[in-house]
Amino acid sequence: MRSHKVTEGDAPVYTFDGSVTARAVVNAEGSVVEWNEGARRLLGWSPADVLGRPATRLVAPGGAFRLPPPGSVIGSGTVPLRHRDGRTVSVWLLAHLRRPKEGEDDKEGADSGGWLILCPLEDPGPLSRDEPLSAAVMAQSPCAAAVFDERLRLRGINDVMADAVGIPEENLRGLHMSEIVGGRQGEKLEEHLREVLTSGRRKDVQTFLQAADEDSAHAWSARIAPLADADGQPIGICVTGHDITEQYRARQRLQLVNEASIRIGTTLDVTRTAQELADVCVPVLADFVSVDLMESLDHGEEPAVGPLSAPFTLRRAAHRSVNPGCPEAVVGLGDLDVYPATSPQATSLVAGRTIVATDPATTLAAWLDWDPVRSARVKEYGIHATMSVPIRARGTTLGVAVLTRFESKDPFTPDDELLAEEVTARAAVCIDNARRFSRERETTLALQRSLLPQTLPRMPALEAASRYLPAARAGVGGDWFDVIPLSGMRVAMVVGDVVGHGVQAAATMGRLRTAVRTLADVDLPPDELLTHVDDLVVRLSKEAGAEGVTGELGATCLYAVYDPITRRCSFARAGHPPPVVLAPDGRPLDVHVPAGPPLGLGGLPFESAELELPEGTLLALYTDGLIESRDRDIDAGHDLLVQALSRQRGSLDDACQGVIGSMLPQSGAADDVALLLARTRGLKSSQVASWALPANPAVVSRTRQYVLDKLAAWGLTEMAFTVELVVSELVTNAIRHGAPPIQLRLIHDDTTLICEVSDCSGTAPHLRRAKTFDEGGRGLLLVAQLTHRWGSRHTENGKTIWAELTLAEE
């Protein structure tokens, strides 16, 4: 190709000369549709001779003309062509695929697609080293270039490289790369130069260079290539570089957005999410970042909607700095601070957009004058740019993130603003999700706490302690526990787990706990009690499905009843982990309790197991969240629990805390955990008295005497009149309405005296009000008035009527 320079005014104008290149266009059908002057000079054919005719007519006999294969956009090769004078001309051709111009698909001509075929007509010859053009390459190339000799001394640099280094060439010639750049960066570059000189293979590296008159380094893509003489011997190194700072920053921004999508929102914790926002932005986007959230978020309130007005009370949720310990921070983590209308935080919150202050000393003068502590920090660290970005999600304002620069001397650019807003917007959604989750979690926890026992009752049968821990990450579940005093100084212990999490699981737990307490008052055996609870869960599942809520509720449960007089304990479980039982000396006891099906399956039987427990036996009832985790299965967790309990000494409360600390990670359990520990006690034989009575009314008077003698032996003569009346009424009712044999039993401890009368009739007594002239019906009413509480329970052979009296305090 050739160009001519003409002058138009003071500026040269260059015109393209197409005669130095033979140019033709062949359409998709193989016909010539364009033929220029260069093509006429090459083959002698005029445009009138070839246009519209097949291109194959131009090929010499015996030759072949083939367009590049389909899918190709470029092709080349040597083709024998026929000159107009009859001779054969062997020509090297270059072919480019031409795309049809828009709107010209159906037109014929040079711009309708096909192949552009080119052939150079003149060879200007190789570039001579002595030509001005060759000398201008080094000096005027837009690419930074430097030349080092075989001793890796700098011999020359062009103007672009001199500008990048910031030092003239004459001051640098003879220096090594490590001496020019300095530091570890210079040493690495020199190692690369030595490697290329030794191996003879070029190498591409990325580096950062800072000119003498610049505040920050630029990113450079450098190509290091060996230089050789005519014999191929190495004589030096050529280094060319391109400033890729903008591309590097663009990659950093893209990487930051990608990291934000991965690193922000890993948990449903508001504070942790705010900290992730600060961590992502430092140091790529700022040197110090603070995240302040609305105070209303602390109380579970909904954030304000609509226009906001200063001043604002915000809580510092997170901050991060390039300096360890965040010495730039004026507000501590978790502390409240007030931001007046002159502050960038308030300005951005009121405006609802990003606010950039390029010179805090002037643009924020009013605020800094109001806050001398911040003013001192700005001067101490040389803060020169701040950017306040409101944290907004779903139309509500949650807080503000403030980005600050002091080590980086660059101001915030519009691209930085867009990037900060993008990252903050992602974080805002995560913070709002965490806020909503936290609010629901606190609501569910409050509901669950209200449904769980606030304190455990003090009982002569056993000492008990408990712990409940909600899941650290999942929603609150339906774990529960309870200790229920029964008649005859017996006690029931229960631990259960409702499948699922959230408010529904907590509500279901409350209903099941109430049902278990109600059934326990009836004194049902453990296996029968679980059967009734199973029926309830089945009905709850049907109700949930009918209301459009996911049905198939499920739960597990372990129920135990301990009698301190016989020292026997009965267990039954419905798909729940078995209890851990340790003898008083710490040895684990083998307790085989049939697993039973989980609650909610319906129609399947439950079995119970009974075990005699020495006084001081330790019982552990728990939910699977204590023993099961990703790192271990249930069996391994069960063995670990046995070991943890064996090591515990001291009070049961300390034992609970020790077990929780050794079984669960510090970050919290993955599932809810309920733990109930109980240490059994036994009543002495001297605290129990019993008599077998014949079914004869005459025995009532003798029975009263038996009772009076025993009360005197126990030192309870002050209660003799009341106890005498209660025993008379209960024994008389058993003789009249029950079936022999009849048994009377008295039980007492420091606070309670219990009277029990058992017979073999299954008919339960009923409390009623007798009319004025009725001869009977007042016995049980009298018992109810004289005692603290009374009731009946079914036994294997009949029933037992019992009444409790509270002993007078001395």
Image: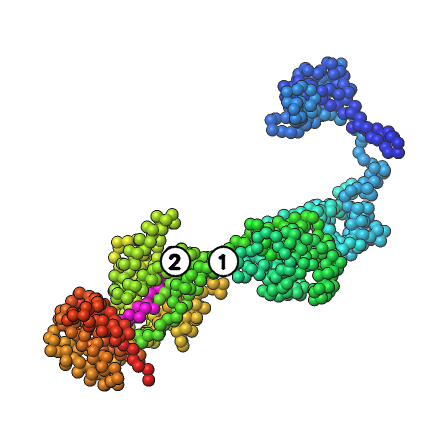
Q: Position of residue 47 (x, y in %)?
A: 74, 16
* Residue beneath the point at 38% across and 67% down: 453
Q: Position of residue 660 (x, y in %)?
A: 43, 67
Classify mark 1: helix, strand or loop.
helix
* Residue beneath the point at 31% across and 61% down: 515
Classify mark 2: helix, strand or loop.
helix
Instruction: Give left or right: position of 318 versus 197.
Output: left
Instruction: Using the image, tell me which numbered label, if any, was put on residue 439.
Output: 1
Instruction: Give left or right: position of 446 versus 344.
Output: left
Res. 636 in view: no
Q: Answer with the quarter of the image where residue 514 lies.
A: bottom left
* Residue beneath the point at 26% across and 55% down: 604
* Neighbourhood count class around disc 2 (C-alpha, 10 Å): few under 14, some 14–19, many 20 upward: some
* Neighbourhood count class around disc 1 (C-alpha, 10 Å): few under 14, some 14–19, many 20 upward: some
Classified by dominant secondary structure, the portion drawn in magenta counts as strand
Amino acid bearing label 2: Ala
Residue 790, compared with residue 359, is above or below; it is below
Residue 537, compared with residue 745, is above or below; it is above
Q: Which residue is mark 2?
A: 507
Magenta-colored span:
483-499
Res. 423 in view: yes
